[in-house]
Amino acid sequence: MKRKLKEENNAGGSGIPASKSQSKGKGKGKQVKRQKSAASANKSDVVWPEYFNSLFKTFKAINTVLAFVSSKKQLAVTFSAIRTSVEAQLKHPLEISSIAELKALLPDLVKFSYVPKDQLQVHGDKDKDFQLPSRGAGANSMKGGGGHILILELADNLQPKKSKNAGFAYSQPPAVSPAALKKLIDERNEACKEALDNLVIHAGPEEDPAALLQDAGREYLPADPTAPAVPSQPEASHVVPEHKDRPAIASVVKEILEQPWYKEQIVHHQVFEPKPPLDGSVDPPPSPAILQALADSRNITGFYSHQARAIEEIRQGHHVVVSTSTASGKSVVYQVPLLMALEKDPDAKAIFVYPTKALAQDQKASLEQLLFSCEGLSHLKVDTYDGDTPQDARATVRETASVIFTNFDTIHASILPHEDTWRKFLKNVKLFVVDELHYYTGLFGSHVALILRRFRRVSAAVGNRRVQFISCTATLANSGPHMQKMFGLESNDVIAITEDGAPASQKDFVVWNPPLVDPMQPALGRASSISEASSLMRFLMKKGIRVILFCKIRKVCELAMKTIKADLSNEGCYDVLERVRPYRGGYSREDRRRIEADAFSGQLLGIIATNALELGVDIGVLDAVIMLGFPMTVPSFRQQAGRAGRRSKDSLIVLLTEPFAVDQYYANHPDELFDKKLEGLMVDVDSRVVLEAHLQCASYEMPISLSDEKWFGTALPELCDNSLLKDRDGWYHPHSNFLPYPAAHVSIRGAQDEKYLVVEMDEHADSLKSIEEVEVSRAMFEIYEGGFLHQGITFITKEVSHDTRVAKVIRADVNYHTSPRDYTDVNALRTYRIRRAKGTLAYYGKVHVHVKVFGFFKIRNKTILDAVEVDTPAWDRDTTGFWIDVPRDILNLLRSLQLNVAEAIHAAEHAFLLQFPLSEDVRTECKAAEKEYKVTESMRKRPARVIFYDSIGKGGGVSARAFDNVQSILEQACDVVANCPCEDGCTKCVQSPACKEANQVSSKLGALIILKGFLGRELNYSQETLQEGVYTGPETIVDAPAVLATPDIEIEES
Ligand SMILES: [Zn+2]
Ligand SMILES: [Zn+2]
C-alpha cells in the first residue's frame, strides 16, 4: 500500500506542474523514476519551509478526523460536518485554500469538491445508518447556494486480508480495527510528508516550494456550480473539443502513455489498418427506380462484393446466409431483393424478424424510407405486428402490409395458430428474413428452429412452397450448415456468403490490465477495474471522443456511473458530467428514447451500458468502446467492438480485463478475439422435450400425420403415439393438457416474463413510483434488503416480497455498495430415470432449488466495511435436473490426500459443464468461499454429489440432453482435465466464467479424481506424490442421502 502511495505522490504524479527545469521534453514515465531515486537519496535531510510544517499539521488533523468519521459511518462526509472537529484539533480556522493545496499535492488521495445534493441526501429515512452527520458551526457559510454540497474525503486504501485456508473469516463483521485505522492514518501522513519532501527536492533553484504549492492550490479551489460565479475562482481549464475537431486515436493512445496514471496497463496494442472497399456488380442491375431510391434515401451508389453476390443468388432462387463483419451494410442484402420482388409482383409479402424491438424499429424506419423513395412502390405499407400491436389494428396490418416486422414469439403464439386469418398473407410470402441469426442459440434457438419448421409446414399446406429464407449473422465458422439446421433446409439450397467487401476504417485495439495495487505484494491483487475504466473514459471524453463503456451486469453499470460522476465532479468537469448517461435494460421506454435521442444527436459524450445495447439501435457515431471485463463470449465481444467507428473515422477498442481467469486468458491470447471464426452455434432440434412441445402446437395448427416426418424428423411417430391424441382416421391432435391453446403452454424464452417490480417510496411512504423491472434470475441477487443501485443514484431496498414480486426502495446516498451473501441449495427430490455411465449411475429427476440471501457486505473500494444479516424470505422453485453421487471410496481417497472435497466437487461440476455445448441453460450448485473456508464448523452440510439443473422457467429439457450423453461428456471432461497443461485449473478445464462464486472454491486435482472415479479409471495417488493437499479445515460435505424413485425404473445403458 505504502509503495503505491509513494509512487503516486511524487511530484510527477501530483497535480503540481513540474518545475520548469524538468518540464522540458521527455516522457513523464522517465521523470518519475529519476525523481524517485533522488527522493530516496535525499529524503532524510530535506528542510521544509515553515509553511509546510503548518500545512502538514492541517493534513494530519484532517486525516485523523476523517479516518474516524469514515470508520464509524459509511457516509459521504461533507466539509461542514468535519470542519469543527478539525478546527478543534488545529486550534485555528481551517482554510479552504489549505485543503485545495493538499489536493494539489495529493490529487488521488484528497477528494474535495461539490457534488449535487440530490445524490447525497437521504429522503425521508429515519434510520441512523443512512443519515448525514449533523452539521457543525459554520456549515451554512459553506453550503452550496443551490443544489450542491462540498465534500471532503480521503480515498480509501485499505485492503481486506485474504488467506485461503487460514479462515477467510468473513463471519465476523470486518470493521476496521483500531490498529488498522492507526496504520492507515500513519500511511497517509507518510504519503503527505513524502510529497512535501519531493516538492522541496525538485523545486528549481530560484523557486519557492511554498509559493509553487499555493499557486497550484488555486487551481483546485472547489467551485460551487450553482453559486454565482466568483471571478477569482478559475474556470475548469479544459474545453471539450467539437466532435469534428477531436484528435486522431493514434495520437490519443500515445498521450495516454504519458499520463501520470498510466502504469503499463496496456499489455497488448494492435492496429487494424484501414481496408478499401471491394466493389461488386449486379447483372442485370436492379431497376433505375430502385437504384435511384438507394441513392436518395441511403446515399448508396454501388454495391460491395458481398451485397452484389447475395442479390444475385437470391434472384436465382437460393436461400442465402451472409456472414460478414458488423456494419458491413447487411440490410441492403435483403432490402434490394425485396424491392425487386415487389416490382415484379405488387402482392408479394415478406416477414422480417429481428431479435430486439429496438433493432426492428430502426430497420423498419430505414425500409420505409427506401420504399417511399422508390418510384412505383411508395404506396406500399410496412408494419409492425407483435405483442404490442393493438387488437383492433391487427386485421388491418394483416390485410394491408406488404412487409411485417415481427418476432418469433408472435409467429409462435399468434400467427401460426391463426393460419386461417393469415392464409392470404402466408400464400404470398416471398421472403422471410432473419437478421442476427447467431442470436438464436441454445434452448431459445432450438425453439426457433422448430417454429421455423412449423412455419414451413403451414406455408406448404396453403400452397406456398417457394418462400426464400435470408439471414445475416456475425462471422461464423459454419454459417451455411447453421442456416440449414435452423431452417431445416437441404445443403444444396443454401448459399453462404462470407467474403466481406465493406471498407473498414483504422481501428486501434488495446488490452488494458489494471496495475497491481502494490507491485511488491502481488497478493493484494489488481487495482479496481471500475476506477481504471473511469480514468480512461474521462480522459477520452475530455478530448471530445465519444465513448461507450460496456459493463457485464447492471450493478457494475451503476457502480461505474457513480464512480465516473463522482470523479468528474471531483475534477470540476461539470460540462462533461452533464454529457454522460447510463443506458441499460429495465428503464422505462421514455427514458430509453430520451437517452437514445441524446446519443444520436451527438449530445452525449459517454454512455455506460449493459449489453442491452449490444444488438440495439443506431446511436450515432461512437469513437471508442471500452469493455469492462470480457463480455462472456467472443460473439458478444465482436458485437460490442463493432459499436465503434461505424463510419469512416478511426476508432479505439479497449478490453479492460478483470482478475477472472477468462479475462486473463484473453489478455494472453488476444489474437483469438478477432481472428478466429466462431465455432458452431448450438441448436438442438432433436430435444424430445422441445420437439414434443412444438408437435402439440403444430397439431393444433393442422392435424399431424406420419408424413410430417419430413418437417420434424424420425422421432415423430413415437412422440405422437406417446403424447398426442390419435383420431379414427389416424390424424394426431394436441393432448387435452395443452388445450385450448397449446402455444400458451410453450414458453420459448423461459422465465424472463417473471419479473420483479422495483418501486420507490417517498418521504412518507405514502406514494410509490415504479422505477424498473428486474428479471427473476437477477432479482434474487440484486434486490435484497440492503442496497440497490439505479442511474448512478443509490437506492436502498427496504422491503422485498417474493409473492407479489415487488421491492420497495428509498433514495439515499451512501459511499459504499453492497454484495449479497447468499447460498443456493440444490436438492434431488425424486428420481425418474437412471442411466449407467461406466462405473457409475446417473440419476435424472425432480430437483428443488432453494436460494437464500442471508445478508450482505457493505463494500467500499474493495474493502468490506461491514457484514449485515438480513432476514429476507427464501426463494424456492422446483425444476428438473440430474446428479451423480460421489462414491464412498472416492471420498475416502480425497480425504486421505487431504484434498478439500467441496473444491473437488465444484471443480468437477464445472469441468462437466464446460464440455456440454448447451451449458448456457444448465446450472449447478456453486460453492462459496465464505462458507467453505469458514473456520468454524458449518451447519449447512451438503451431499457428496455433483448436481445440475435446468435454469428455472426455461422450459426444461436441456439437462435431459446432458443426462442422455452423460458418459461421453464425462469422458471428454476427464480427458480435458487430465491433459490440460495448466497448473491449478483454468477456463479450459475446470473454471467457468459462469460460476456464480468466481471459481474461488476449486481443485483441479480433486476434479480429476472424481471424474476418474465416476468412469472407473485407474487412481494411483498417494500423499507422497502430491504437491498440494493439506486441507485440514472442517468438512462441509456428507454422504449423499438416498432419493425417492418412481417405481420400476429400468436402468438405461450408455
Ligand atoms: Zn486447465
Ligand atoms: Zn461454480
Image (spheres, rainbow, N blue to C red):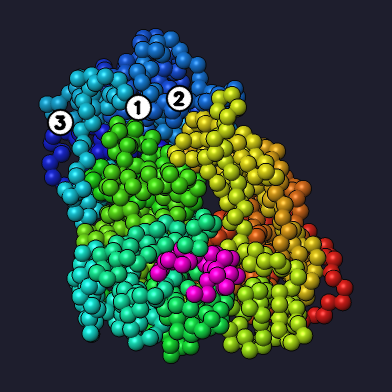
Q: Amino acid at mark 2?
A: Val
Q: Is residue 18 visible?
A: yes
Residue 321, image quadrant: bottom left
Q: Which residue is mark 1?
A: 113
Classed neighbour count for the residue bearing mark 3: other residues with Cα under 10 Å, few (<14), some (14–19), many (≥20): some
What is the tally of numbered marks visible in this picture? 3
Q: Earlier in the sequence, mark 1 or mark 3?
A: 1
Q: Which residues are magenta?
A: 397-424
Callout 2 environment at 10 Å: few (<14), some (14 to 19), or many (20+)? Answer: many
The image position of residue 788, as x and y in percent, is 54, 39
Q: Nearer the viewer, mark 1 or mark 3?
A: 1
Estimate how packed mark 1 is, as few (under 14), some (14 to 19) or many (20 or more) residues with alpha carbons within 10 Å: many
User: Which residue is label 2 attached to?
Assistant: 77
Using the rendered image of the protein, determine whether residue 98 is visible from the camera's viewpoint: no
Disc with the residue nearer the chain's start (3 vs 2): 2
Q: Amino acid at mark 1?
A: Ser
